[in-house]
Every structure is written in C-alpha cells, then in structure tokens.
Image (cartoon, coloured by chain):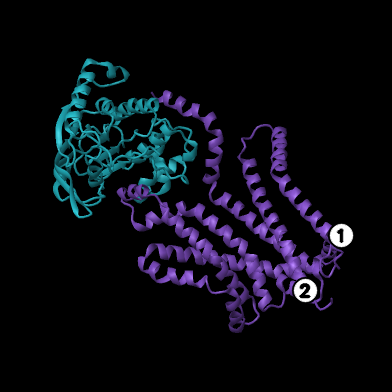
Chain colours: A purple, B cyan
C-alpha cells in the first residue's frame, strides 16, 4: 500500500478543486453584492444596514451552503471508506495542520504572490502595448497576431524548463511564465473592445476633426474598458496557477515548492492546505479586479443604478424643461 | 459669444457660433455598389443665409444623409461646390457642426464632458471648454445635471446634450440629422418647441434633415423637398409663418396649407410606389 500514495494524492487534489471553483464563484458573488449595496440610494443608516445584511445573506447563503455540503461530503467519504490520512485526510486534520503550519504556509505564499502580481502587472502592460500596436497598424496585425495566437498553443510544460535553463532559479522564469499565460486573454479583450467601437461615434468625432490619436484616446480606449476587465478577470484566474507551475519546475520557495515537498513527505493534509491558500489568493485577485473596475469605470456601475432609479428621476428633467420654457 | 450672432461674420473663423451663410450648388455624388454605379445626388442646390433655419425633407433613401456627410466633410463630392460665407469649402468640415439622429453620448463622460468633447478635439483646454459650456446649461434645461452620466438622463435630455455638444463647437453652420427622430411624440414636440425658442435667441444657421414634415415647418424659414434617388430639389417652400412660433402655430390655416402642400409634393415624388423607401441607407432603427 505504501507504494501507492502518489496517485491517491492526486485524486485528493481533484476532490479539492470543486471546492476551489465554488470558492472563487463566491468571490464573484461577494463582489456583486458590494456593487448592489453601494448602488442602493442612501437613506437612513439603520434601514441601510438592514438591507446590506439582507442582501449579504441572500447572496451568500448558497455558497455557504455549498461549502458546508462539500465539507460534509468530504467527511462522509473519509468516514465511510476509512482511508488513511496520507491518502485522504479529514477536513478536521487539514484545518488543524494548516493552522499549526500557518507561518510556513504564509512565508511560502509570499514569493508566489510576488511572482503572480509582478507577472500580471507585466502581462497587463504587455497586453496594452500589443493591443494598441496591433489595432493601430494593419501590418502589425497581420505580422504579430498569428504569432501571438501560436504562442498560446505552445504548452507551458515545454517552455517552463527552458526558462529555467535560460534564466536559472531566480524570480524571472516564474514571472515570465505568468506573463506568457496571462497576457493573452487581456490582449484579446482589449482588441475586441477596440473593434466594438460604434462606427457612428467614429464618424461623429471625425466630423469634429479628430485625428487618429484623438479617436483612440477619446473613444476607442474608454470604449474598450469593459472588455479589458473581462479579459483581465480571465487572466487573473490563471495567474496564481501559472506562478505555482513555475515553482514546480524550478524554484526554491513558494506554494508550488511547498506542495511538492509535502507531497513527497506524504503530508496530503498540508498539500490540501496549500491548495486552499492558492484558491483564496485567486479569489482575492479576482475580487480585486472588481474593486479596480469600480474605481476606473464609475460610470459603468452608475448605469446599472440608473436602471433602478430611472422611474424616480424621470420627473425631474421634465420639470427642468418647463423652467426654461 | 454664441449669443446674438444674427449677421454673417465674414472671415472671423471658428469663433462665431453658427452665423455663416451656406450655399450648396449643383452637388453630384454617386457610389459604386457592386458593379453598378448608384447615383445618389444629382444636381442638388440649396442656400441658407446667415442665421436662417432651413429644412430638407424627402423620401427615405433620397440622399439626405449623403448630403450631410458631404457637408460634414466625411464624403467627397463628384461635382458641385459648397460655399460658406462665399468661400469655397473643401475637405473635413471645419465650418459645420454635425448632430446625428442618435445622441451618441459617451457613457464614460459626464454630461458636461460630453458637451465639451468637440471643443477638446479642437484643442481647447478642458477647464476652458467647461467654462464655455456652463452658461448654456440652464438654457438647455440641463442645469444641476452637469455631473450626471448619460445613463442617468432621459431621452430628451440626452438629445439636448447632443445639441449642446453641437452648438458649442462654434462652427458657422449646424447640421441636424433627424435630431428628434428617436424620441416619443410628447418629448419630440416639447423639444421642437424648445429648439424654435433657443434658435430665435441665438440665430444659428441651421440645416435640418427630417422625415417629420410638421417639424420642418414649425422650425424652418424654408423647406427643400427632395425627389427620389438620384436626389435634387423638387420644390422649395418658403415658410412665412410669423415668429415666435409655438404650439398654436400648428393649428394656423397657413401651417396646415403648407403641410398638405409638402406632403402632396412628397407623395407625387414617390409616385405612389410603396417599397421605394425600403432597403434605404437612411432608415435606422430608433435604438
């Protein structure tokens, strides 16, 4: 039996992945909740708090229920099958060992976060530059776009070891892997956003005498912002995984290394702890895109409020019209 | 600056809000459509003196939009000429400010910044552009809504912002392309009456393209009726109704006489052929 801990451990990882999905879904829900809460018109404090609590509950109970059911099911499998903790530890064991080793988990999470954030930052910058260049020059579109698409079909499994050969065990190869994995969705989002610009709006600005730079800055860029954030969210969800993969291939610290080491030591409970930390990191990053979007595009959320408030507002413009008549 | 420009202002380029005279002579324009050459404008001529409000009505697909695209500098002519204040105009229209049927406000810009976009394109600093727009906000019924986003405005307000965006560009001639076509009847009437009043105060030179015959009559000094494609002017009707005009003008005997005259002309132009107005470039769904 002791010769087979490897495969079962992988099964465990798969068991945990629905949890990861469910958890990251909950962040989406939470972010939406925050939106609608601040969207509500400000009235009295108590009523507002009550509504916030009500909204929070109505939006969060499904994910709470889902998580509870998942943990219960997990426990049930452990109880019924009587698998040894090296194969499938119970939720309780995973929680306890994770709490006991929290400082190690944390110190290993730091480099992973660094790689992810740095990689994403470079990826977003790259995506913007490439998207603007590809959009601006037909030649660049024909020359680069196919190559960029092709770059996405090269398996990271192949590229990652090459990066280690070229750049050693430093931060660089992991950051590069994150960049390669994550720039593409953001870039495609931006390009779609540029292309989605209404012809009539372009004509209007051109009739005002706008040059290409003004068309880009005043119309095409702001118009592309919702698409950018859609792409960014896809990118961000890949970010942490890409960093961990980079560490797997060649690293000295980080959650990837931690997972590898604990897997080799048959500490399945700690591997699962690292998986949970990874999921939480992804959730935080994903949620933060909504926070940034809210700051960058307040108009986008105002529009949604307006749908709610329209009825109340409709009377006002008419009143204003009368005044001037 | 935009107030009371009732006379032509000669060579004072750009600074006078819509106070130029415009003369369109013998315009011809055809498009290549597949293998066929489609003639859209044939010998189209019209005039507006400084501070005049003229309208162009015609069946759908009669080339009204093409005319505007040419004036706005978005299309080239095959033959003919456009003169503003007597001077020949070529290329992108620095003399015309264009207001499309749809408001096309940018959702990411607040009301005041939507109104200033044309000035910004001209290179006017943002703060100065806002200062130029501000005095007009109240008159346009937009006071207190400067910081609202378009999604928070009613359809009528959006259209007034679009008009504000057009007039603050300080062009010599204002082109209105079915500006109220997408609005409901009440709002449309409201805005037509309002526009007549605001125009009286400012005396911009306006060319209005519309399907709405009463709108053309209510607002204009002169109405040009275009024929079917290829379009030329079939009839030019002077509207001598007294100003100020208002809701009561609609029921004047002279108003209804002119209305039936124009409608009759349009019907004869279309030759009673249904379907002539289908498949037209100018038909746009109201959002």
Q: Where residue B150 sits in the image (x, y, percent)?
A: 46, 40
Q: Where residue B215 sits in the image (x, y, percent)?
A: 28, 27
Left or right: B106 as drawn, with respect to B213: right
Q: Is residue A74 above or below residue B190?
A: below
Q: Is residue B110 above or below residue B271?
A: below
What kind of element bears circle 2?
Answer: helix
- Residue drawn at the location 26% of the way across and 31% of the way down: B203
Mark 1 is surrounded, within 10 Å at the Cα level, by few (under 14), some (14 to 19) or many (20 or more) other residues, namely few
Q: Where residue A252 sits in the image (x, y, percent)?
A: 71, 78
Left or right: A11 as drawn, with respect to B280: right
Any part of residue B51 in sight: no
The Cα atoms of the two marked residues, 1 and 2, are separated by 22 Å
Dividing the picture into quarters, in which one does residue A248 lie? bottom right
Any part of residue A156 in sight: yes
| Marks 1, 2: nearer the viewer | 1
If the image is split into quadrants, where does the N terminus of chain A sit?
bottom right
Chain letter of disc 1 in the image:
A
- Residue drawn at the location 25% of the way across and 21% of the way down: B243
Q: Nearer the viewer, residue A102 or B52?
A: A102
Left or right: B73 as drawn, with respect to B46: right
- Residue drawn at the location 81% of the way across and 69% of the way down: A87
Mark 2 is surrounded, within 10 Å at the Cα level, by few (under 14), some (14 to 19) or many (20 or more) other residues, namely many
Q: Nearer the viewer, residue B77 or B143?
A: B77
* Disc on res. A263: 2
Task: Work out whether disc 1 and disc 2 sit on a shared chain.
Answer: yes
Q: Where residue B79 sits in the image (x, y, percent)?
A: 13, 49
Q: Nearer the viewer, residue A75 or B115?
A: A75
Q: Is residue B189 above or below residue A206?
A: above
If the image is split into quadrants, where does the C terminus of chain A sit?
top left
Q: Which residue is mark 1?
A: A79
What kind of element bears circle 1?
Answer: helix
Mark 1 and mark 2 lie on one chain; the one further toward the N terminus is 1
């Amino acid at each position: 039996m002791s010769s087979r801990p490897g495969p079962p451990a992988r099964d465990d990882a798969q068991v945990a992945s629905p949890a990861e999905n469910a958890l990251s879904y909950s962040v989406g829900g939470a972010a939406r909740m925050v939106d609608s809460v601040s969207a509500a018109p400000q009235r009295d404090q108590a009523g507002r708090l009550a509504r916030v609590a009500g909204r929070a509950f109505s939006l969060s109970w499904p994910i709470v229920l889902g998580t509870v059911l998942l943990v219960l099911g997990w426990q049930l499998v452990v109880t019924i099958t009587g698998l040894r903790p090296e194969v499938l530890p119970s939720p309780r064991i995973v929680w306890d060992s994770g709490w006991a080793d929290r400082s190690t988990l944390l110190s290993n999470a730091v480099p992973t976060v660094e790689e992810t954030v740095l990689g994403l930052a470079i990826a977003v910058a790259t995506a913007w530059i490439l998207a603007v260049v590809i959009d601006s020059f037909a030649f660049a579109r024909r020359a680069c776009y196919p190559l960029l698409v092709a770059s996405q079909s090269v398996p990271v499994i192949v590229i990652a070891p090459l990066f280690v050969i070229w750049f050693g065990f430093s931060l660089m190869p992991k950051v590069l892997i994150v960049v390669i994995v994550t720039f593409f969705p953001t870039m495609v989002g931006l390009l779609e956003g540029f292309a989605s610009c209404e012809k009539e709006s372009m004509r209007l600005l051109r009739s005002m005498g706008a040059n290409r730079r003004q068309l880009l800055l005043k119309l095409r860029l702001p118009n592309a912002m919702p698409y950018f954030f859609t792409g960014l969210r896809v990118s961000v969800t890949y970010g942490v995984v890409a960093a961990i993969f980079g560490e797997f291939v060649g690293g000295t610290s980080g959650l990837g290394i931690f997972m590898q080491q604990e897997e080799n030591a048959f500490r399945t409970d700690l591997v699962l702890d690292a998986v949970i930390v990874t999921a939480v990191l992804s959730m935080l990053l994903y949620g933060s895109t909504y926070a940034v979007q809210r700051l960058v595009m307040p108009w986008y959320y105002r529009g949604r409020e307006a749908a709610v408030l329209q009825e109340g507002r409709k009377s006002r413009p008419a009143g204003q019209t009368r005044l001037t008549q | 600056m935009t107030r009371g420009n009732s006379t032509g202002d000669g060579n004072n380029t750009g600074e006078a809000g819509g106070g130029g005279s415009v003369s369109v002579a013998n315009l011809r324009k055809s498009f290549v459509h597949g293998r066929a050459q489609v003639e859209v404008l044939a010998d189209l001529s019209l005039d507006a003196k400084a501070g005049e409000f003229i309208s162009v009505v015609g069946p759908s697909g009669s080339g009204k939009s093409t005319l505007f695209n040419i004036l706005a500098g978005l299309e080239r002519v095959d033959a003919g000429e456009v003169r503003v204040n007597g001077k020949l105009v070529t290329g992108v229209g620095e003399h015309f400010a264009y207001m499309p049927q749809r408001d096309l406000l940018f959702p990411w810009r607040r009301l005041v910044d939507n109104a200033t976009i044309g000035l910004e394109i001209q290179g006017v600093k943002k703060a100065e552009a806002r200062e130029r727009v501000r005095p007009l906000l109240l008159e346009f019924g937009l006071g207190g809504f400067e910081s609202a986003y378009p999604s928070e405005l009613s359809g009528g307000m959006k259209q007034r912002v679009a008009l504000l965006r057009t007039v603050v560009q300080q062009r010599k001639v204002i082109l209105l392309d079915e500006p109220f076509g997408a609005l409901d009847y009440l709002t449309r009437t409201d805005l037509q009456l309002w526009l007549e009043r605001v125009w009286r105060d400012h005396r911009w030179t306006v060319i209005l393209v519309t399907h709405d015959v009463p709108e053309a009559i209510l607002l204009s000094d002169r109405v040009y009726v275009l024929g079917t494609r290829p379009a030329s002017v079939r009839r030019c009707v002077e509207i001598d109704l007294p100003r100020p005009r208002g809701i009561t003008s609609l029921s004047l005997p002279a108003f209804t006489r002119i209305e039936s005259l124009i409608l009759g002309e349009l019907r004869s132009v279309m030759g009673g052929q249904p379907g002539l107005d289908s498949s037209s470039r100018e038909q746009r769904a109201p959002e």
